[in-house]
Image: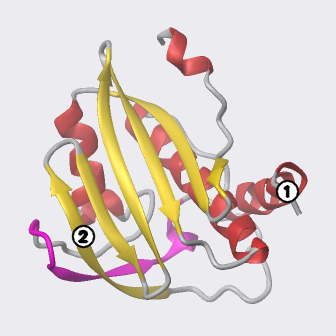
C-alpha cells in the first residue's frame, strides 16, 4: 500500500450537509469503475440495479444488506430485508466520475483517481437533511465501502449489520451535534 493508505478512514463533513469519505482500492481504474456501474458487481457491496450510462437516465437501486456478508450480523430494528430507491444519473465521465440523485433529497458523487497502482475513490454525499440521517448515511457509506475494499482485495468483510451498528455509534461521537 502507498502512503495514501493511512488517510482517515472515517467520513468527514466538508460542508454542514455534505459528507466526504475516501478509500484506496487495487487498480486498474476500469476495475473500480465496474464495481460502481455494473449491477452484479455493485450488489456485492452496495445495491443492485442496472444503469444506462448516460446523463439523465433513470434507474433503481435495490439494497439487500443481509446478503452482503455471511453472516449478516444483527440487523437493527426498523430496517427491512430490502430497500429500493429511484434515482437518476446527473454527471458521467467514465471511468472518472459518476454522480446521481439520492432519491428526491440529495446527491452522491463517486470520483476515481489513480494513486500509483491503486485507485483513490472519493464519495461525496450532499444535501443530507438532518443529523440522524447523517449518522445513518455516514455509517452506511463507511460500512459499504469497507465491504467494497474487502471484495476488491479478496478478504472477508465483517458482518455488515454489526459493523454498521458499531460505526453509527462512532459517527455519533465524531460528527458535531
Verify whether residue 61 appears in magenta: yes
Is disc 1 surrounded by few (<14), some (14 to 19) or many (20+) residues within 10 Å? Answer: few
Does residue 31 sit above or below 128 in this rendering? above
Q: As rendered, which of 24 and 107 lies closer to the eye?
A: 107
Does residue 120 sit above or below 135 in this rendering? above
Quadrant housing residue 50: bottom left
Does residue 129 sit above or below 137 in this rendering? below
Q: Secondary structure at mark 1?
A: loop
Q: Going by the image, does 112 lie left or right of 168?
A: left
Q: Which residue is disc 1 drawn over?
A: 176
Magenta part of the protein: which range? 53-68
Residue drawn at the location 22% of the way across and 33% of the way down: 29
Query: Residue 97: x percent and y percent?
Result: 25, 49
Q: Going by the image, does 25 lie left or right of 23?
A: left
Residue drawn at the location 31% of the way across and 38% of the way down: 112
Quadrant location, the C terminus: bottom right
Query: Residue 31: x percent and y percent?
Result: 22, 38
Which of the two labelled residues, at mark 1 and mark 2, occupies the earlier sequence position? 2
Q: Going by the image, does 129 lie left or right of 148?
A: right
Quadrant housing residue 140: bottom right
Q: Going by the image, does 164 lie left or right of 33?
A: right
Q: Which residue is disc 2 drawn over?
A: 90
Verify whether residue 125 appears in magenta: no
CA gap, disc 1 to disc 2?
Answer: 29 Å
Amino acid at each position: 500500500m502507498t502512503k495514501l493508505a493511512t488517510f482517515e478512514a472515517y467520513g468527514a463533513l466538508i460542508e454542514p450537509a455534505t459528507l466526504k469519505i475516501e478509500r484506496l482500492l487495487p487498480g486498474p481504474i476500469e476495475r473500480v469503475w465496474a464495481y460502481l456501474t455494473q449491477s452484479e458487481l455493485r450488489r456485492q457491496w452496495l445495491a443492485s440495479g442496472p444503469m444506462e450510462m448516460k446523463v439523465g437516465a433513470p434507474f433503481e437501486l435495490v439494497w439487500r444488506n443481509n446478503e452482503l456478508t455471511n453472516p449478516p450480523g444483527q440487523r437493527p430494528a426498523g430496517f427491512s430485508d430490502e430497500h429500493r430507491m429511484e434515482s437518476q444519473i446527473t454527471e458521467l465521465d467514465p471511468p472518472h466520475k459518476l454522480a446521481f440523485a439520492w432519491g428526491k433529497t440529495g446527491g452522491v458523487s463517486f470520483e476515481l483517481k489513480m494513486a500509483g497502482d491503486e485507485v483513490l475513490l472519493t464519495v461525496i454525499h450532499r444535501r443530507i437533511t438532518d443529523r440522524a440521517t447523517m449518522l445513518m448515511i455516514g455509517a452506511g457509506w463507511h460500512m459499504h465501502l469497507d465491504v467494497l475494499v474487502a471484495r476488491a482485495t479478496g478478504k472477508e468483510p465483517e458482518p455488515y449489520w454489526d459493523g454498521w451498528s458499531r460505526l453509527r455509534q462512532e459517527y455519533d461521537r465524531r460528527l458535531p451535534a
